[in-house]
Amino acid sequence: MSGFFARRPPDQPGLAMFLNAGDPPLPVLADVMRMLDDCRVDCLELAVPFPDSVTDGPVIRRSAQRALADGVGLDEVLGLLSGILPRLRHLRVALLADWSHTVRGPAVPGFVRRVADSGVDGLLVHGLPPRLRAGYLEAVQEAGLPVVATCYAASTAEVKAAAAAAESATAYLYLVAHYGRSGGTLTADRQELAAALAALRRTTAVPIAVGFGVRSRADIDLLHGLGADAAVVGSAGVARIEHALAEGADVVEELHTFVQTVSPYSASRSLDKPLIQQTPDSASHSFNKPPGGTPDDRPTP
């Protein structure tokens, strides 16, 4: 059974956030991850940064460029995860890696094993060539690494692809609400999206998370009403990080304020500390646990 979105009450949608590793810089990102954990955000889709994504809009592309300019790659991301994952209580982390930039090569089993050894909760490979899918799935199964698979709601011409994605997903299924690039608004046809969710529900037992254009609590509630288990917020949160970095503001505070607007489980931040610019040595953020949290609900690897 998937550990993603498993601790949400049945009447509440799960929440996933997308971030590029390295934006903000990794020491600050560690603080961000602790904040998300304290706020009981369910999932962080953390991308190993890669350039020129054809599916991403300008906000996420600029984010990836900042991370790449800072020298962040797979080694640095796995090092961060190995250190912080054992300290997280609620947040699950799905690593997103681009096939061409990060994974490409003959040593797929070695890549998968390294990712699994970091303790990450799931893996999503972006741009995986269909001809290599079987070998990839064999490698993740052997490593015991849950798979995040993706498909599109507007998929009448892609029924086989959607069914294959649903079959291969063992962490959760990411349903892209509509074609285009990230960073827009939720423009998907509601009936089409509800029908896609219902069809996928009949073929998979893992949670279904919907993303692309999700910017507000209203969007998340709408998707939940259509049958989604969770929603993925990407550009809207990344834009808050970009704003904080440009203004010299506290990135963790800025994103925490945003999380409070989209999640009913946001912890209340102590107000006795001023907003400060984060530094590589910063680990000063402290958030209060919401009522009802368990001491440690993250499974031991």
Image (cartoon, rainbow, N blue to C red):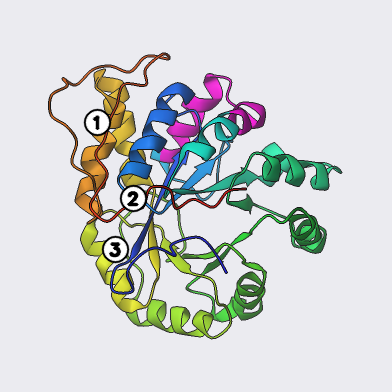
Q: Residues within 10 Å of mark 1 (few under 14, many from 20)?
A: many
Q: Is residue 179 above or below residue 288?
A: below
Q: Nearer the viewer, residue 291 or 102?
A: 291
Do residues under tags 1 and 3 come within 8 Å of each other at their CB atoms?
Answer: no
Mark 1 against mark 3, which lies toward the viewer?
A: 1
Does label 1 or label 2 sit earlier along the sequence? Answer: 2
| Highlighted magenta segment, given as a residue range | 60-79
In the picture of the structure, the residue carrying the numbered disc 1 is 253
Three-letter code for the amino acid on which mark 2 is drawn: Arg
Q: Residues within 10 Å of mark 3 (few under 14, many from 20)?
A: many
Label 1 amino acid? Glu
Place of residue 206 in the rendered image (x, y in percent of width and height, measured from the top left): 54, 71
Magenta span: helix, strand or loop, mainly? helix
- In the rendered structure, the answer to whether residue 255 lies left or right of residue 300 reads left
Residue at the outermost front position: 295
Residue 60 picture location, percent across and down: 43, 39
Secondary structure of residue under mark 1:
helix
Judged from the image, the secondary structure of the residue bearing numbered disc 2 is: loop
Task: Report x, y in % for residue 145.
Answer: 68, 54
Question: Cα distance, mark 2 to mark 3?
Answer: 16 Å
The residue under label 2 is: 40
Which secondary structure, mark 3? helix
Q: Is residue 71 visible?
A: yes
Residue 220 numbered tag: 3
